[in-house]
Structure formats: structure tokens, C-alpha cells
Amino acid sequence: MATKKKLLQAAAGSAGGAGSLDIPDVFSTYLYSGNSSAQTITNGIDLAGEGGLWWLKVRSQSGGHLLYDSTRATGSEHFPIFSSATNAEYDDFDTTPTSTGFTINSTSSGTVNETGQDYVSWTWRKAPKFFDVQTWTGDGVAGRTISHNLNSEVGMMLVKCTSATGNWWTYHRSLGENKYLLLNSTQAQGNTGFMWNATAPTSTEFTLGDYNEVNGSGKTFVAYLFAHNDGDGEFGPDSDQDIIKCGSYTGTGSDGNFVNLGFEPQWVIVKNTTAGSSDQWWMFDSMRGIAAQPVMSTVLFANLNSAELSGGSVGDNLLETLPTGFNANGSSSAANGSGKTYVYMAIRRGQLAVPEDATDVFDVKTRINADPSYVSSTGVVDMAIDRYYNTASDSLILSRLTGKNNLDTNNNTAESTGGYTYYPFDYNTGWLYSAGAAEANRISWMWKRAPGYFDVVAVTGKTTSGNTQGTMSHNLGAAPEMIWGKCRSAGRDWQVYHKDLGPTKTLFLASSSAAVTDSNFWGTTPTDSVFYAGGEMRNADTNIFYLFASLDGISKVGSASHSGTTNVDCGFTSGARFVLLKRTDASGDWYVWDSERGIVSGNDPYVLLNSTAAEVTNTDYIDPLASGFTITSNFTAGDYIFYAIA
């Protein structure tokens, strides 16, 4: 994001409104590896200037949840309190907030920074309509009010004594002012409001009783306040979007219990509140993996020190995200027990603003050494196509929503689980092809989801996701101009919609055949919020859809009638880094060129998405063009669709 834009957003936030703050400005899930020495976590959140909460947890072994905030400090050092314990503030494991995240001071503890261990950090920036931190010294007087800066309904609030032992007293709007939960406990809801003085919080203050663990005389306390947006959020370019919801639902005991948020979440915490229940606080996020069925999502527990585990250990994928909410699955009382009541907090997946530079949302890298990872300029990668380029190879297509599973663009077989023991998108700066693999001469094209540019939709046929027959919601924010769709659970055709062919025609990604006329595949023209899919994507199956659109200066979906030499103007200024071409009026392969291997005035290597053949290096079918690309006279004349990225 441009520096000027960030400064304007920060000014708006400081002035008392969310302004045009985007989700990455106020929330981050950031994964890091321990190194047993000081390290800096750069997540883009201004904790030094704006303040907030950063919550750390070791993933790969047992260790406590450490919560830090900008308000509690001894000089420049900030110390944690543990969500899984009743202890007072712990005088060790200190960190320091910065303007772009925080630093972890030198320590080899397995809890926060041990070499060889994996960690997650969640960060909330203070901002109206989103999050606030308040501290106070107790006076023991019932009816004590504490002012806050949410300027909205309080959705959830955590209160903890920092100077002495005490529980994590938790208010949730769905329970009201006469009930409570304990973040450090599996205990179901308590039915007394003495800690809140039986008074609901307002948009500017909350009320305390005289209870020793929330207002004991002379003791110090902290409160973390999370907002609930209900059509009154002020985020995104137009300052009108909701990004945080705190609500409740009733379990059904079967897959597909849809919770409508109005947005796709990236972070969710869930707790069974039903009297007599004793379930954990389940924590999910899209960086560690909230995967679509049947892949298992990865979970941690706010009240336990245990290492993270797959939802499969309790028999099912307990939670999966959808474009407008999430599904609670299975019959476990943990997240979807029949007739049981659950509360949740969910934070929206973002960004909300359209990208400003193609390098922020697309990258292409070759691998020529033993390093198994692809480091991407996009940071987070949401979809990748990967293959050997100099020898016969399948073209694997993988996505964050489908986890370790993959499909091949060159065949129509069902999704492969691969038998892998790693999570390939479990990274902030790219993705991992294979743990420990030393395979050279591979190439990866990498996409990041962003409004107006690219989106991914995973749909499970057996869900009740709020969609009518064949109609799918999406978050592209524009009408998709090209869609790739595939049934994951069975061997059925890859289908491709393209705006210049219209909804009555389809192409097949794994085939060189010309466009086929059949209105059953795509039905109607997609809109900026929904698309229709039929044919091979049947409702009883798990399906995946990749949605592409044209975005000025970044990407272009179009068509061209080619004969002789054809200049394709995509509106770019420095040429195309990626070009996909497919003939539609007759048989023709799915050609791919990229700048990593070379788009030059001469021979340009290409591979075919519909074939395992090695790259061809001795042809000159396209040439560079500042505004896009040129199809040369060497290429067969005909009608083509194309997709290009700057």
C-alpha cells in the first residue's frame, strides 16, 4: 500500500473513526520460527504508535499462550499474561512494540523463541469499531465504570487481574450482562452478572461489580475489548465494511451447520457455552489452515498449553470457511453438538482495497537448488501452479483452502491427498513444495487473493451454505471474467468459463478441444457477488473454483482474433510477466509463457497446462510489448482467449 495512503488511514484512525483502514492495517496472523535470539516480527501493524494486543503461541510443542499489550510496560519492556493460566503478569519473555509489529528479545525458551520450534502470533491494533485495551486499578466499589474507545457495541471482552492470581473473566454479547465465561477454563457459561454489575457495556464504557478478580481494591487489571460490527463497520476504501463479528449459533450434530457472517473469516474462536458442557476454546486461522472439507483444519486451544493439532483427531474437519461465513461440521460437542449453544468471534479475511501493484498479488519463481520453498513477492500465497519445466511433468494446482491436497490441470482425476505430512501454505512469504525435497528445475506461478483480481471458492455439496441450487457466492468484488472449476471428489472435467465466450459455452482445461456449447455448465453471466455452476460440478461433491478478473495495470482477461502479427493491448506499462493463450474456434493447447523463463524478442519457452510435455524452447510465438504482448506470425491464426498479468 502506498505510504501516503497509509498515513491518511492512520490519521483517520487517530481522529476517532476507523476511516478507510483496511484489515491488514489492524489485524495480522503471522507465523515465525524460533531462533533463540532477538528477532523482529514485521507484520505491518503499528503497535508502537497506535497500540494494541499481540498474542503468541508455540505450535510445534506444548507451551503457554502469551498475551502482550501496548499499555502494560516496564520501560520499553512488555511482559505477558497467560490465557491458559490464572497467574499474574509474568516478569520474563519480554517483547517491544514497533511501528511495523514487535520485537522478541533474546530468549531460548520453547514458549516463545526456541530454535527449531514453530510459532504463531495474532495481532490486534487499537482502532474504533475493532479493538481497544484499557487498564485500571481496582477500588472495590460496585458500579465502577471504565471508559473505552471502541465507539461501537462490545462484542466480546476479556478481563484479567495482572498483579495477582485470577481467572480470565469473559463477557460476550450473545450471553449478556448476567452471564460470563472463563477463557482459561472449559467451564460452561456462569449465570451471575456480579462481575459486570448486571450492566451491559455501552459504546463508550463498561461497568464492573465489586468482585475481587475484576475490581479488587489496589489490584491492577487489563481489559481487551473486541467490537461487533453489524452493518456499522467503517473499514475499507469506502469506510463502510464490517470486519469483526461476535455471535452465537446452535449445533446441529451434522456437517454443514452454516453460520452467516456476511464475509469470509480468516480467524475464528468458538466455545460451547451450554450448561454441563466442558469443551475447549477452539482457535482457527487461515494461515495455519482453515481448510475446506475433507481436509482437516488446524486448531489451538486458548485454555490449553498443548501443541496444535488437526481437527481430524476428533473425527472431522470441525470448521471450514465459506465466502459469506463458516460451516461448523461433525457431531462433536466441541463445535457442533446437536442442540448445544456456541459463541464465537470471527475476523474477516482481507484485504478490502484493490491491489496497486502486480508484484503484490502475483509472482513466478523457478527453483534450481535444493531449497524446497518458493519465496514470493506477494507474501501470502493463496494458489499456486507448480511443475517441472524441463522434463515431462504434471502441472499441480494447489490452494490454501484445500491444504495439502492437489489437482492436476492436465487431467481430470479426483484430488490427490499426496500423503504429505506438511502444510504447503503454512508460510508468510510463499509456500513449500515438499518438506526436505531437493528437486531442481521446477517453476511455480503464485497468486494472492485480492478484490478485483483473483478469488478462490471451495464448496462442499453436502453443506447448507446459504446458496441456492448451483449458485455460489464469491468475494472477487467484481464480475469474474474467467472461472476454472473442478470437482475435487471425483474424476470429472475441468470446466472453464470466459466472458468472451459467454455462459452458454465452456472450455476444458485438461483438453485441447475447442469451446463447447452447453448452457448447463455456467447457466448465467456471473455478477460481482455470485456465479452459477452446473454440469460436472454437482451439488453432492466437493468443488473448487478459481475466479479471475481484469484489473487496470495488473491483469487482463480478454480475447483476440489472430492472423499475421497481433499486438494485444492489456493496458500495462512494462509488458506482461505471465501470458496464457487458448484457441477457441478449433482445437488448441493451453499455452503458458512467463518472464522468469523469458518473454523476449526471439525464442520464448512455453509449457502447456493440458499436457505433461516438457517445455518447448525453440519457438518464437510471442514477443514483448510494453502495453501487453505480441502474438507473432509464427503462431497459428485463429480466435483465442488470453489471460495476462503485468
Image (cartoon, rainbow, N blue to C red):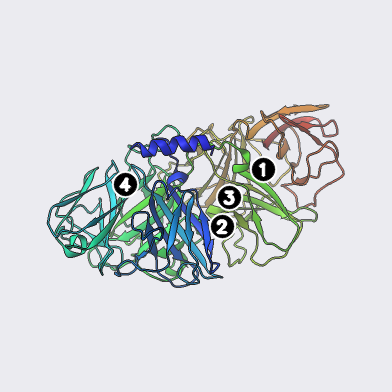
Q: Circle 4: is it few (<14), some (14-19), or many (20+) Cα within 10 Å?
A: many
Secondary structure of residue under mark 2: loop
Q: Quadrant of residue 415?
A: bottom right
In contact (CB < 8 Å): disc 2 and disc 4 = no
**Dot 3: few (<14), some (14–19), or many (≥20) neighbours within 10 Å?**
some
- In what element is the residue under mark 4? strand
Please tell me which residue is depicted at 55% across the width and 70% down the height of the picture.
115
> Which residue, given by chain and number where applicable, does mark 4 sit on?
227
Element carrying mark 3 = loop
State the CA–CA distance, disc 1 to disc 3.
31 Å
Instruction: Tell me the SS state at disc 1.
Output: loop
Provide the residue designation for mark 3: 379
Mark 2 surroundings: few (<14), some (14-19) or many (≥20) residues within 10 A: many
Q: State which quadrant residue 367 falls in.
A: bottom right
Disc 4 from disc 1: Cα separation: 46 Å
Give the CA distance from mark 4 to mark 3: 28 Å
Q: Which residue is mark 1?
A: 508
Closer to viewer: mark 1 or mark 2: 2
Please determine whether, in this image, residue 111 is positioned above or below residue 550: below
Quadrant of residue 590 in the image? top right
Marks 1/2: CA distance? 32 Å
Q: Amino acid at mark 3?
A: Gly
Q: What's the residue type where badge 4 is placed? A: Ala
Q: Furthest-front residue in view?
A: 75
Residue denoted by label 2 = 427
Tell me which amino acid carries mark 2.
Tyr
Q: CA distance from mark 2 to mark 4?
A: 28 Å
